Image: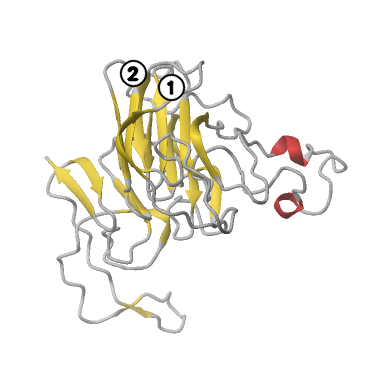
């Protein structure tokens, strides 16, 4: 992380640190050289805490989370505002990678309205649009776009947020209003970079706007932690799921391969597998030998807290 943010008791937000992408809420000076979505900017720092100015309709700020070069803040009414680096559409402002003029790359060359569908421009929701030479950044807080919904009412404001290096997770309740607290369920929505599966759904898109993480259905997540390119999610059931990059073993599954879909995390197996592979073929079929995997060992106690470093993970058990 290159910057920090904190909220006062009066609901004001102050930021300090790196600001080359406007992540401290201060417009950086224009820089010479190539301009556009993939430009590299010179280091700019805010040396003393600076108050961030929000739109007039924003209420007192209640919480804030920071990523590598972007910031998200939620006011007392649950409205979320984002600013900073948006090169990986991590601000949650919709798919801002295009100008809103020619969308054939996203929806194909056949007009959807001819087929009875909606027009492309009304389908793709975005809060801002960048021109070809515009740096993909926001130095002033902009309200995020709500996740798309299908055959259901809109999601309520997020319960809490989490940020990785260049992606963002918002936790929304998806159960009916009349459900009790014990029956409540939620869904994790992720936006931003997905090259290593950190959005928890698949590897079909390198970047994505708000899309649900593939956690168990009708579950409730109580805690989320994000690292550089991996995430941990703790459910009310006590189950721990991880996804994303595992180059340094940070997913805790004993492997270094990318996991684009969440996997359940347990302790490293300590039992010994059978020495001889067993024949698992059906009677009358050619033999098929497999070595049984050792049984997974549960954590020594109930997991109550999760945390992520840049490429590391930790849990606290009670």
- Determine the residue located farthest toward the bottom in the rendered image: 286
Which one is earlier in the sequence, the residue at label 1 or at label 2? 2
Spatial separation of the CA atoms under disc 1 and disc 2: 13 Å
Disc 1 target residue = 78
Residue sitting at x 17%, y 50% = 299
Tell me whether the residue at label 1 lies in contact with that at label 2, contact meaning CB atoms closer than 8 angstroms.
no
Q: Quarter-wise, where is residue 303 in the image?
A: top left
Locate residue 232, reporting x and y percent: 31, 48
Relative horizontal placement of residue 182, taking residue 28 as reference (left or right) = left
Residue sitting at x 60%, y 32% = 149
Front residue of 263 and 43: 43
| Label 2 SS | loop
Q: Residues within 10 Å of mark 1 (few under 14, many from 20)?
A: some
Of badges 1 and 2, nearer the viewer stands 2
Q: Residues within 10 Å of mark 2 (few under 14, many from 20)?
A: some
- Tell me the tag on residue 67: none
Disc 2 target residue = 11
Locate residue 32, reporting x and y percent: 55, 55
Give the colouring mode of the picture: secondary structure
Front residue of 292 and 313: 313
Image quadrant holding the C terminus, namely: top left
Relative vertical location of residue 248 with respect to residue 137 in this rendering, above or below = below
Locate residue 196, reporting x and y percent: 44, 60
Relative horizontal placement of residue 119, taking residue 177 as reference (left or right) = right
Residue sitting at x 35%, y 31% = 64
Front residue of 137 and 164: 137
Q: Can the viewer see residue 218?
A: no
Q: Can the viewer see residue 231?
A: yes
Front residue of 135 and 82: 135
| Label 1 SS | loop
Relative vertical location of residue 48 with respect to residue 253 in this rendering, above or below = above
């Amino acid at each position: 992380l290159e910057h920090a943010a904190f909220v006062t008791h009066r609901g004001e937000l102050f930021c300090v640190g790196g600001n080359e992408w406007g992540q401290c809420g201060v417009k950086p000076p224009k820089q010479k050289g190539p301009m556009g979505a993939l430009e590299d900017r010179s280091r700019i720092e805010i040396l003393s805490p600076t108050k961030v100015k929000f739109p007039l309709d924003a209420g007192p700020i209640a919480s804030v989370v920071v990523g590598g070069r972007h910031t998200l803040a939620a006011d007392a009414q649950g409205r979320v505002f984002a600013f900073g680096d948006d090169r990986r559409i991590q601000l949650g402002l919709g798919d801002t990678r295009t100008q809103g003029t020619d969308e054939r790359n996203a929806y194909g060359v056949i007009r959807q309205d001819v087929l009875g569908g909606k027009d492309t421009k009304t389908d793709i929701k975005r809060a801002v649009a960048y021109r070809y030479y515009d740096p993909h950044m926001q130095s002033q807080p902009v309200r995020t776009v709500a996740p798309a919904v299908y055959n259901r009412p809109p999601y309520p404001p997020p319960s809490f947020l989490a940020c990785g290096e260049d992606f963002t997770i918002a936790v929304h309740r998806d159960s009916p209003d009349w459900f009790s607290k014990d029956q409540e369920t939620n869904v994790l929505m992720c936006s931003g970079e997905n090259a290593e599966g950190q959005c928890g759904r698949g590897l079909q898109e390198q970047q994505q706007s708000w899309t649900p993480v593939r956690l168990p259905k009708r579950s409730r997540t109580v805690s989320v932690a994000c690292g550089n390119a991996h995430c941990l999610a703790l459910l009310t059931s006590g189950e721990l799921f991880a996804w994303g990059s595992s180059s340094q073993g940070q997913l805790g599954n004993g492997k270094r391969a990318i996991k684009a879909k969440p996997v359940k995390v347990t302790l490293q197996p300590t039992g010994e597998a059978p020495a001889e592979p067993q024949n698992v073929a059906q009677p009358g079929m050619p033999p098929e030998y497999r070595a049984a995997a050792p049984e997974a060992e549960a954590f020594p106690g109930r997991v109550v807290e999760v945390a992520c470093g840049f490429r590391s993970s930790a849990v606290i058990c009670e």
